[in-house]
Image (cartoon, rainbow, N blue to C red):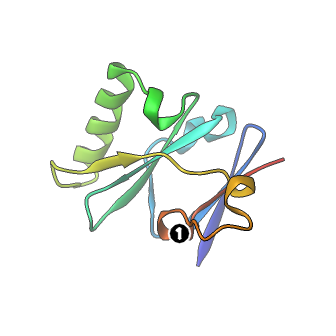
């Protein structure tokens, strides 16, 4: 099953088994970072693209990842907007979609 969370100027659709690190910030977020250790997958809502996250934000992600039992060697990825993917063979991890209004 998929879950939909509204973010600023759009929505993110993702598998409902994924862990939302900071859902209280989703409504005002422009972007998401996807975190995975190969077993768990987490979503971090942010104003910045994953490639532009600050050291402070990465420390926040690290604290969330640790609290949810992620392995220490987890990775952080960005997500490609759906309008960029349409008509291509690209897919986001877990078939997640970021759709802008």
Residue 39: x, y in percent?
27, 68
Q: Does dot 1 land on a helix, a strand or a loop?
A: loop
Residue at 73% of width from left, 37% of height from top? 8
Residue under label 1: 16
In the picture as drawn, the residue positioned furthest to the front comes out as 88
Say left or right for 96 vs 70: right
Q: Dot 1: within a 10 Å radius of its alpha carbon, few (fewer than 14), some, or many (20 or more) residues?
A: few
Figure disc tally:
1
**Camera-side residue: 5 or 94?**
94
Say left or right for 7 vs 40: right
Residue at 53% of width from left, 62% of height from top? 92
Q: Quadrant of the N terminus?
A: bottom right
Residue 49: x, y in percent?
53, 34
For residue 82, above or below residue 46? below
Say left or right for 15 vs 84: left
For residue 33, above or below residue 36? above
**Camera-side residue: 84 or 96?**
84
Say left or right for 9 vs 56: right
In the picture as drawn, the residue positioned furthest to the bottom comes out as 1
Residue 2: x, y in percent?
61, 72
Residue at 47% of width from left, 64% of height from top? 93
In the picture as drawn, the residue positioned furthest to the right comes out as 101
């Amino acid at each position: 099953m998929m879950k939909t969370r509204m973010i600023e100027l759009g929505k993110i659709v993702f598998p409902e088994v994924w862990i939302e690190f900071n859902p209280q910030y989703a409504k005002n977020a422009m972007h998401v970072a996807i975190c995975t250790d190969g077993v768990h997958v987490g979503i971090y809502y942010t104003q910045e693209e994953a490639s532009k996250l600050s050291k402070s934000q990465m420390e926040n992600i690290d604290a969330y990842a640790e609290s949810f039992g992620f392995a220490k060697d987890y990775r952080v990825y960005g997500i490609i907007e759906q309008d960029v993917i349409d008509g291509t063979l690209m897919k986001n991890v877990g078939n997640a979609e970021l759709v802008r209004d």
